């Protein structure tokens, strides 16, 4: 008689003991952790972030890149110098932060752990409590009566027990690649791990006997049963990564933006990049800077071949919507006013429900709101960003030629059989994903860089790739959204018009932003240098919106756009007049195009300005100095006004007071 074999139990081959704790404050999601130590060979149990979730999607791509050269050159040498070289007397690395994650047979991250089970049992030393997340991990805690009771919320029930925090055991079902189970993924310290592994393999004798501090973390309540009220495991770990790197070691601003789950700006940038990858492919994503390693460069458009940067987009939204009024506008753009009942934004000092956060970027919204916010962003903001950065004819044409260039280049290399195909793929990876370049690829990289610089120079006006212009473009979109919402015009139409305004601004018959125009000098340009100030950005916005006067559309939209154009041009002229006056007053002493006698007269008048103002009740416009300035800049103002009227083909403007916004962006 044969016996049917029982199902094999899960193999928890990784086992560690250490200090145990639960990190939870004021209703936060509980994070359990083990503080333990690894021997050098234990490092083989650990995985890099890139080892999981290997599908080509944006969530995979934004796992933090490992700068292997830096890890070898800096961290490895810090830990163990080469033979014959002086070693630092004292060395130490902070603990690696290691997360327990579940993966399927394709190495993709599982959103939730299996439902956990609780067992109250004992061993030869006394009572123990065992919790198991089947196929992932098993945690054993030891009973200690004098400790405060802790509540473990498992899939079967809540369990109130007193345990030791000095000692506990964790067992993890660490599986091979492409086998369903668990992995121990380093979420902070990947460069340290790479350096340690490099030394373990190449120079083991230099670190023989080293003991490495490790902190293992996991969110115990992120189980299938709680999928409606607990965040997903990857979301929790992503937040831990951002928090640790925000407060301890600064990583690229791009990654801090993209990996964060707790700001609306991060959702906007993340969903935009996902949309680009899904609809424009890896070549399209290669035109958006999203993984620049240096923080300062992450706030700029720093690569010669790209269209924009998520650092620019994120800071644009922060500048547009940072006030209470801005947040209300953003809520209206998203349609939150129609879905207020779906969100809980807390209470004010009078315990009354808040309708929305007061300030952008809406930090720390509840995790259960994230999916709804993602949906609203993808309905109302992502399409607008796609319009602005891939719908404008100049950008669209360059995207097509960019992709064609790499396809044709690869075909030529394959056909010529020069043996450079591998080098080409490395160069292509550098341009598309900012991958590392080996020394053998420098020459080809230089050639490709020159080719792309020529293509982008032929296709895209240089001013359109300036950070200040792209911020102005998004601000112009926000202003149009406000006008359209007020007049019950679909807000989706706003990006359509801004796209047209951008195209018209650089048309050969107008070239609205050509630095040779007199009306741009002293207000947007100083000579050939762009003035990077809030005032200059607002002037660019006004000129963009001035195109609404010539837009072909239905009567209702035409009226709104025409009235807005006239008002914006009027404001531009007033600010231009004020800017030119200020520049003249600051520079007349060294402006040798002014006759010496006029400079002397101005100097004397400026000395007496304060006493004259007292006579005129503080009105500076009546002083001799201001009268002289007005006379001397009058010709420049008249010529600038005429230049603007010719360029816009209109003199029908509405004048309003200018604004003073000279702070640098």
Image: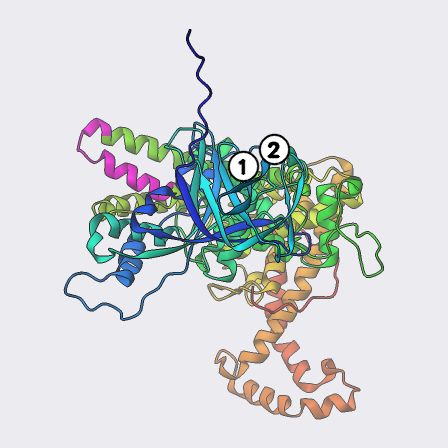
User: Is residue 307 among what the camera can see?
Assistant: no
- Majority secondary structure of the magenta segment? helix
- Judging by the rendered image, the residue that carries numbered circle 2 is 224
Q: Look at the image and say whether residue 523 sits in the magenta stretch.
A: no
* Residue under the image location 60 percent in, 56 percent down: 540
| Label 1 CA crowd tier, 10 Å (few <14, some 14–19, many 20+) | many
Q: Mark 2 near mark 1, Cβ–Cβ under 8 Å?
A: no
Q: Secondary structure at mark 1?
A: strand
View extreme (left): residue: 84
Q: Secondary structure at mark 2?
A: helix
Q: Does residue 586 sit above or below 34 in this rendering?
A: below
Q: Could you say where residue 549 lies in the image, as x and y percent from the top left?
A: 69, 46
Question: Of residues 227 and 294, which is closer to you in this image?
Answer: 227
Which x, y percent locates residue 317? 62, 52
Residue at figure coordinates x 37%, y 46% from the top left: 434
Q: Which of the 4 quarters of the picture holds residue 610?
A: bottom right
Is the residue 407 above or below the residue 42 in the image? above
Q: Left of 228 or right of it: where is 32? A: left
Depth check: give the residue in front, 572 or 664.
664
**At x 68% / y 42%, what residue is drawn?**
369
Nearest-to-viewer mark from 2 and 1: 1
Question: Where the N terminus falls, by quadrant?
Answer: top left
The residue that mark 1 highlights is 132
- Residue 34 in picture, x, y percent from top left: 48, 51
Residue 108, can we see it? Answer: yes
Earlier sequence position, callout 2 versus callout 1: 1
Tell me if residue 421 is in the magenta stretch.
yes
Is 302 drawn above or below residue 284 in the view shown? below
Vertical placement of residue 313 versus 107, above or below? below
Magenta-drawn segment: 414-432
């Amino acid at each position: 008689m044969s016996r049917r074999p029982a199902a094999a139990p899960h193999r928890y081959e990784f086992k560690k003991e250490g200090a145990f704790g639960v990190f939870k404050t004021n209703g936060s999601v509980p994070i359990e952790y083990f503080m333990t130590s690894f021997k050098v060979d234990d490092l083989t149990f650990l995985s890099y972030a890139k080892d999981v979730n290997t599908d080509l999607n944006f969530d995979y791509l934004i796992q933090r890149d490992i700068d292997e050269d830096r890890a070898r050159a800096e961290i490895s040498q810090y830990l163990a110098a080469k033979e014959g070289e002086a070693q630092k007397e004292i060395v130490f690395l902070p603990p690696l932060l290691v997360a327990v994650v579940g993966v399927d047979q394709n190495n993709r991250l599982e959103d939730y752990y299996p439902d956990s089970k609780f067992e109250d049992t004992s061993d030869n030393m006394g009572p123990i409590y065992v919790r198991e997340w089947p196929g992932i991990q098993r945690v054993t805690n030891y009973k200690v009566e004098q400790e405060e009771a802790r509540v473990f919320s498992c899939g079967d029930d809540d369990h109130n027990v007193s345990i030791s925090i000095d000692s506990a055991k964790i067992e993890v079902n660490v599986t091979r690649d492409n086998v369903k189970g668990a992995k121990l993924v380093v979420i902070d310290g990947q460069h340290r791990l790479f350096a340690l592994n490099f030394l373990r393999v190449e120079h083991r004798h230099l670190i023989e006997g080293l003991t490495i501090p490790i902190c293992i973390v996991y969110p115990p309540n992120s189980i299938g049963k709680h999928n409606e009220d607990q965040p997903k495991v990857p979301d929790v770990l992503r937040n831990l990564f951002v928090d640790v790197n925000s407060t301890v070691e600064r990583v690229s601003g791009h990654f801090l933006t993209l990996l964060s789950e707790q700001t609306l700006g991060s959702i906007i940038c993340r969903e935009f990049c996902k949309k680009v990858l899904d609809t424009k492919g890896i070549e399209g994503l290669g035109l958006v800077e999203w993984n620049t390693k240096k923080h300062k460069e992450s706030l700029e458009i720093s690569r010669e071949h790209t269209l924009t940067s998520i650092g620019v987009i994120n800071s644009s939204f922060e500048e547009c919507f940072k006030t209470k009024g801005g947040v209300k506008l953003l809520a209206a753009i998203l349609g939150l006013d129609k879905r207020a009942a779906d969100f809980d934004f807390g209470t004010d000092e009078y315990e009354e429900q808040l309708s929305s956060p007061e300030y952008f970027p809406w930090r720390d919204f509840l995790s259960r709101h994230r999916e709804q916010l993602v949906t609203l962003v993808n309905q109302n903001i992502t399409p607008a960003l796609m319009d602005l950065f891939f719908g404008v004819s100049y950008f669209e044409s360059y995207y097509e030629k960019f992709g064609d260039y790499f396809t044709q280049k690869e075909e030529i290399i394959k056909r010529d059989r020069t043996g450079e195909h591998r080098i080409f793929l490395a160069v292509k990876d550098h341009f598309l994903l900012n991958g590392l370049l080996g020394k053998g690829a420098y020459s080809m990289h230089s050639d490709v860089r020159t080719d792309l610089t020529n293509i982008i120079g032929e296709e895209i006006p240089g001013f359109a790739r300036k950070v200040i212009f792209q911020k102005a473009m998004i601000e112009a979109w926000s202003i149009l959204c406000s006008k359209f919402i007020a007049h019950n015009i679909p807000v989706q139409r706003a990006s359509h018009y801004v796209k047209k305004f951008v195209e018209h601004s650089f048309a050969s018959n107008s070239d609205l932003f050509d630095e040779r125009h007199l009306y741009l000098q002293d207000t947007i340009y100083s000579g050939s240098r762009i003035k990077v100030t809030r005032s200059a950005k607002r002037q660019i916005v006004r000129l963009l919106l001035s195109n609404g006067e010539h837009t072909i559309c239905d009567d209702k939209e035409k009226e709104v756009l025409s009235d807005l154009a006239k008002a914006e041009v009027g404001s531009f002229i007033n600010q231009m007049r004020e800017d030119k006056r200020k520049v003249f007053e600051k520079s007349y002493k060294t402006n040798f195009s002014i006759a010496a006698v006029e400079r002397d007269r101005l100097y004397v008048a400026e000395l007496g300005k304060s006493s004259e103002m007292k006579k005129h009740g503080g009105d500076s416009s009546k002083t001799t100095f201001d009268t002289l300035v007005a006379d001397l800049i009058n010709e420049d103002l008249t010529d600038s006004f005429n230049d603007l009227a010719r360029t816009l083909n209109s003199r029908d403007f509405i004048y309003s007071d200018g604004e003073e916004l000279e702070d640098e962006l």
